[in-house]
Image: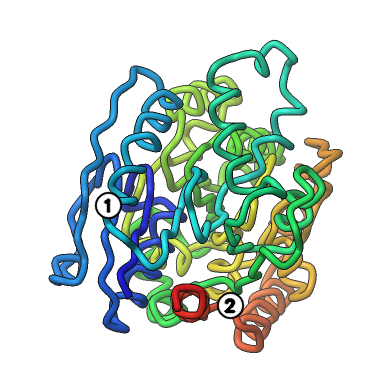
Amino acid sequence: MKLAFCIFRYYPFGGLEKNFLRILMETASRGHSISVFTMGWEGDIPAFVEDKRIKIVDVRHRGITNHGRCMSFVMNVRPLLEAGAFDLVVGFNKMPWLDLYYCADVCFARVSKSKPFISRLTPRHRVFLELERAVFSPEGKTRILALSGIQKRIYREEYGTQDERFHEVPPGIEKDKIRSCLGKRAEFRARLGGSEACCMLLMIGSDFKRKGVSRSLRALAALPESIRSATRLFVIGKGDEPEMRSMAERLGVAGQTVFTGGVDNVPEFLAAADLLLHPALSENTGNAIVEALIAGVPVIATSNCGYAFHVLESGAGAVIEGDKFTQTSLNAKLAELIALHGEQFDKLRGKAILYSDSRDLYSRPVVIADIIEKLGV
């Protein structure tokens, strides 16, 4: 088949982009020809992308704002898609003219309801709501790859999208890549400057505000001094780092907090970590939650994360209320889990491993490639 993949930008450390790359790899390995339409590709182009069946197309775009550039891309990619005579157009961001949409973004219409009314009068709001409606409107025909049941429910409530247009897919975590690092825990901890007695907390994900980095900083600061001084928080990803560093300074935990930026050795951090924090304000899925469980790392997550149910079902950590979040609940739960020692904590690790060995947390690229082939016929 001749396929078109559309993605606004490729950033090598983003969860969406990592999944995009694995889906691209799986689909191309089946012999299909794929053109990738994008505004920009940051970082190296993987060797397999240089295959003659895969073509990267840099789409012209203009605009001084993010929403302006996105709309410019949408308008300029349309004639390219029409001229290409593609069997199927797959989008990894919301836009018109898609046959299939990989739904990694939160529902803009739902989130905007919690914003001040004046923000809903801005050009940014109008553009992103228009792009979202183009995918989910009941009048549309775009099929949707739903990454969680919560996500599907929210979009159906907001837009009345027909149930049959959704295809629910499992996570797509690279189990072997994560597990291969577990035997080197002491080595990785030493490299990160942490002894075995040190409690190493981990956060993974870009968009620090939405992921709840400020919540984690406050929870760290609320720990008793004797515990806090022996605890370190590593924040991996891309976000407003200056603002979060300033907050850590004000809270007195700058010395216990490390901002790493985007990294390509996340499995090493997981191997070294004692606990993953994911107190997100909103989160379609939360791949980091599942990655942590596969690595045997207990998790504290908010209930509005699409993958929070994995923490509940595994018993390897805790889920706190998300819609009615209180900082005190996170503070208390963090202190409670850090206080666990030896056999108690090992039991949580064992539950995480056992659960991740008994569930399909891995086949997303294969399942999606199967759906693409079925729809493209």
Mark sitting earlier along the chain (1/2): 1
Tell me the crowding category of disc 1: few under 14, some 14 to 19, or many 20 or more residues within 10 angstroms, Cα based: few
Q: In the drawing, does residue 273 fall left or right of residue 164? A: left
| Residue 175, position as x, y percentages in the image | 47, 79
Image height of 141 relative to 157, above or below: below
- Residue shown at 63% from the left, 58% from the top: 285
Q: In the drawing, does residue 370 fall left or right of residue 212? A: left
Q: Could you say which is closer to the camera, residue 128 or residue 192?
A: 128
Name the quadrant of the N terminus: bottom left
* Res 344 → quadrant: bottom right
* Res 17 → quadrant: bottom left
Image height of 47 relative to 98, above or below: below
Q: Could you say which is closer to the camera, residue 201 or residue 326?
A: 326
Name the residue carrying label 2. Answer: 361
Helix, strand or loop at label 1? It is: helix
Can residue 107 be seen?
A: yes
| Residue 104, position as x, y percentages in the image | 55, 53
Name the quadrant of the C terminus: bottom left
Q: In the drawing, does residue 267 fall left or right of residue 231? A: left
How many angstroms separate mark 1 from mark 2 (CA)? 38 Å
- Residue shown at 61% from the left, 32% from the top: 129
Tell me the crowding category of disc 2: few under 14, some 14 to 19, or many 20 or more residues within 10 angstroms, Cα based: many
Please name which of the two marks, 1 or 2, marks the residue nearer to the observer. 1
Residue type of the residue flagged with mark 1: Ala
